Image (spheres, rainbow, N blue to C red):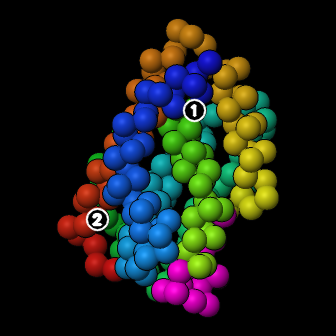
């Protein structure tokens, strides 16, 4: 099944991205506000640039089966940026070079696999952030993490079931390539923002 192959084929990129996205700091409750803002900015830029484009490539049946409008994460990120006084307009004008899949269902689902997968740890991340003294009284600025709430497990299971059904074996490599390219988008953007954005 493609989901199992994706997990193995993206493992190295996943591990590298975690180091760039302050996983250790999150889990030991030492994440700083500036580090959190960087996480928000990376996720916002990716979703602002790519979310609508990826979704527009889905056929109606796939979009309906995924209940795609309930998976939009940009509104939650916009709320978080507003809470933390981060200038959205400045971020929209960032000159970033992001990989975009071709209009092929296997490629699009490969890219979405990474964006959907990034929500998997959201509830745990939110719990740790709330336990971090740096984020006292900051609940209203934590919309992205925990965006699916109690539906997290169900949404991920449904996504994986659909992906395993829709992506044919002949397109496995295309799907895997796009997932890794999406990880590269996140890694490269994270590195670029270190140099260009002040929090």
Front residue of 89/170: it is 170
Q: Which residue is farthest bottom?
A: 137
57 in relation to 48, above or below? above
Residue 149 is at least partly visible in this image: yes
Q: Where is residue 92 in the image (x, y as percent from the top left)?
A: 40, 66
The N terminus sits in image quarter: top right
Residue shown at 47%/70% (left/top)? Answer: 28
Disc number for residue 193:
2
Q: In the displayed structure, does residue 138 sit left or right of residue 61?
A: left
- The magenta-colored residue range is 132-146
> Residue 164 falls in which quadrant of the image?
top right
**Disc 1 marks which residue?**
109
Residue shown at 60%/78% (left/top)? Answer: 130
Residue 83 is at least partly visible in this image: no
Residue shown at 44%/60% (left/top)? Answer: 23
159 in relation to 121, above or below? above
Q: How crowded is mark 1: few (under 14 residues within 10 Å), some or many (20 or more)?
A: many
């Amino acid at each position: 099944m493609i989901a199992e192959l994706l997990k193995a084929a993206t493992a190295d990129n996943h591990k590298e991205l975690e180091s760039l996205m302050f996983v250790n700091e999150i889990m030991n409750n030492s994440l700083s506000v500036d580090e959190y803002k960087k996480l928000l900015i990376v996720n916002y830029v990716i979703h602002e640039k790519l979310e609508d484009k990826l979704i527009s490539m889905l056929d109606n049946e796939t979009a309906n089966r995924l209940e795609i409008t309930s998976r939009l994460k940009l509104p939650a990120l916009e709320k978080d940026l507003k809470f933390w006084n981060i200038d959205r307009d400045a971020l929209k004008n960032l000159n970033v070079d992001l990989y975009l899949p071709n209009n092929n269902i296997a490629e699009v689902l490969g890219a979405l696999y990474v964006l959907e997968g990034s929500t998997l740890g959201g509830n745990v991340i939110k719990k740790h952030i709330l336990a971090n003294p740096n984020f006292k009284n900051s609940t209203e600025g934590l919309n992205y993490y925990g965006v699916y709430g109690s539906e997290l497990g169900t949404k991920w299971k449904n996504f994986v079931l659909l992906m395993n059904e829709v992506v044919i074996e002949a397109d496995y490599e295309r799907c895997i390539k796009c997932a890794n390219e999406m990880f590269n988008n996140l890694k490269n953007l994270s590195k670029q923002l270190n140099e260009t954005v002040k929090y």
